[in-house]
Image (cartoon, rainbow, N blue to C red):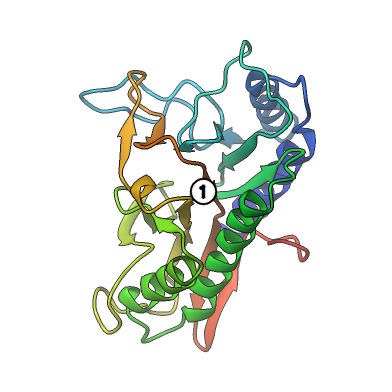
Amino acid sequence: MREACRMSAEIRDICAAAVAPGVTTGEIDDLVIEYCKKYNVSASFFEYPGGRYAPDFPGHLCVSLNDEVIHGIPDRNRVIMPGDLVKTDVGIFKNGFNGDTSRTVALGVTDPEVLRLVEVTRQCLKAGIAACGPGVHLGDVGYAIQKVAEDAGFGVVRDWIGHGVGRTVHEDPEVPNYGTPGTKLVLKPGMTIAIEPMITMTKAGEKTNVLDNGWTVVTRDGSLSAHFEHTVAITDDGCEILTLPADYP
């Protein structure tokens, strides 16, 4: 699993570095395809089952822009523009295990409030990770994330949450980005979870809709959102981030 997570982090940062004006989200997807071919691994999200109401996911990563919270479908006709908030979310499957990680790129953004949204979301991720450890309730983790976001005046998406990661890329337990201390599942050594705050510019943005493609989640009021994610392992004395390089987040 360490190797799947290391590779997930590597391709995450390759994709983030490729975000530039004029690049299409489909071209970002091509980078994941090339990476998987080069290292003989699989993209965790490609053909992820859509269930009864959606087709299987057609992309090799999610690229979500602006008011799109998560699950943006790569498109060779969708051009990234200056001022876009670009969220790249990717997982690699190797040797029976998955990694899952994401980051937000503020491309040429100068609005200080938008930049603050991105930074606060990054701090939410750090707060959630700092709260993790054996004997900690998931409600404590969610509360730590929620407090940072709401103290800064931003909204926390409740319809979509973090999750366990392992043999499958999405598995139990559910890991909400909000909560009440002392509630929910107690973390134990050996658990691996994805912590992924999804924070919105407005409180109204906490409410979301899914586009007609069956996948892409957007804020209901059209407000901007940011998203960061790490896969974390619970250890005997705390936790370990599996999807680092050392300079991230």
Quick check: 189 left or right of 36?
Answer: left
Q: Residue furthest top?
A: 77
Question: Which residue is rendered at x = 41% and y = 56% of the image?
Answer: 155
Which picture quadrant has residue 119? bottom right
Quick check: 171 left or right of 107?
Answer: left
* SS under mark 1: strand
Whether residue 134 is situated above or below residue 95 in the rendered picture: below
Question: Which residue is rendered at x = 49% and y = 71% of the image?
Answer: 148
Where does residue 147 sit, x and y in percent of width and height? Answer: 43, 73
Q: Nearer the viewer, residue 239 or 4?
A: 239
Which picture quadrant has residue 86? top right
- Label 1, residues with CA under 10 Å away: few <14, some 14-19, many ≥20: many
Q: Quadrant of the C terminus?
A: bottom right
Whether residue 182 is situated above or below residue 154 in the rendered picture: below
Whether residue 246 is situated above or below residue 84 in the rendered picture: below
Quick check: 232 left or right of 209?
Answer: right
Q: Amino acid at mark 1?
A: Asn
Which picture quadrant has residue 248? bottom right
Q: Which residue is mark 1?
A: 98
Question: Which residue is rendered at x = 78% and y = 30% of the image?
Answer: 20
Q: Quadrant of the N terminus?
A: bottom right
Q: Nearer the viewer, residue 192 or 195?
A: 195
Where does residue 52 sit, x and y in percent of width and height? Answer: 20, 24
